[in-house]
Image (cartoon, rainbow, N blue to C red):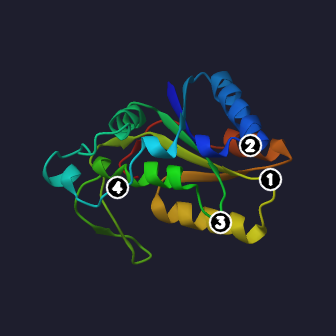
Amino acid sequence: MKALVISDQEYLTNTYQELNDFTGKFFKQKGYEIEMMELKADKVTFCMGCFACWIKKPGECVINDEMAQINGKIMNSDLVIYLSPIIFGQFSPTIKNVIDRGLPNMLPFFEKRPDGSTMHPPRYDTYPSQIIIGYGDEISKEDKQLFIDITKKHRRSIEVLIYQEPFENTIRALNSLELGRVGGLL
């Protein structure tokens, strides 16, 4: 099984290094082949909202940057782990950009969710499991909850964890997850 770890190269703190090392070791022990991607903000352009990924080149972004390779790696993985600093209760701009640029992996229609909001339906039958792990040195209770709420609003089938001491809590949370490809929802 393949796992892709995506992180933001702009925030390489000591906490990040611990989390990155921990994540690689943890999933290798679980039998995953790990690929680590530390992305720079200038390597992934922001989504232009042109919808060419639906109209001109269905399933492919027309922006010529690293996202074409990243989307391919995401879709060919069984598990994607995003490591993001928590910044004012949200994920980093680079991680948000990668999540937003996953738009070609969805169809250009809308479905109504139980909470009344809308979401695009899946393009493919299965997707990799997704986990986002937020980290930081001093994160308020409010920022942790906001991070969880915003992340869950962006993706229906994503697990959200906060990495902090004691590390056993993160290990326990990861061990409780069922990982691998999941059917139909992003």
Pointer 4 and pointer 3: residues touching (CB < 8 Å)?
Answer: no
Q: Report, in whole angstroms, how far the alpha carbon at label 1 lies from the one at label 2.
A: 9 Å
**Residue matched to label 1:** 137
Residue found 44% across the figure and 40% down from its top:
43
Q: Amino acid at mark 1?
A: Asp
In this view of the protein, which residue sits in the foreground, 131 or 56?
Answer: 56
Question: What residue is disc 4 on?
Answer: 47
Of marks 2 and 3, the one in the foreground? 2
Give how far apart the Cα atoms at labels 3 and 1 are.
13 Å
* Left or right of 10 in this view: 162: right
**Which sits earlier in the primary sequence, circle 4 or circle 2?**
2
Q: In front here: 23 or 122?
A: 23
- Asked if labels 2 and 1 touch by Cβ distance under 8 angstroms, the answer is yes
Residue at image x 78%, y 67%? 140
**Label 2 close to label 3 by CB (< 8 Å):** no
Disc 3 crowd, CA 10 A, few/some/many (<14, 14-19, 20+): many
Q: Left or right: where does residue 139 sit relative to residue 105?
A: right
- Which quadrant of the view contains residue 108? bottom left
For numbered disc 4, what is the local secondary structure?
loop
Q: Which residue is mark 2?
A: 13
| Residue carrying label 3 | 89
Crowding near the residue tagged with mark 2, few <14, some 14–19, many ≥20 C-alpha atoms within 10 Å = some
Upstream in the sequence, badge 1 or badge 4?
4
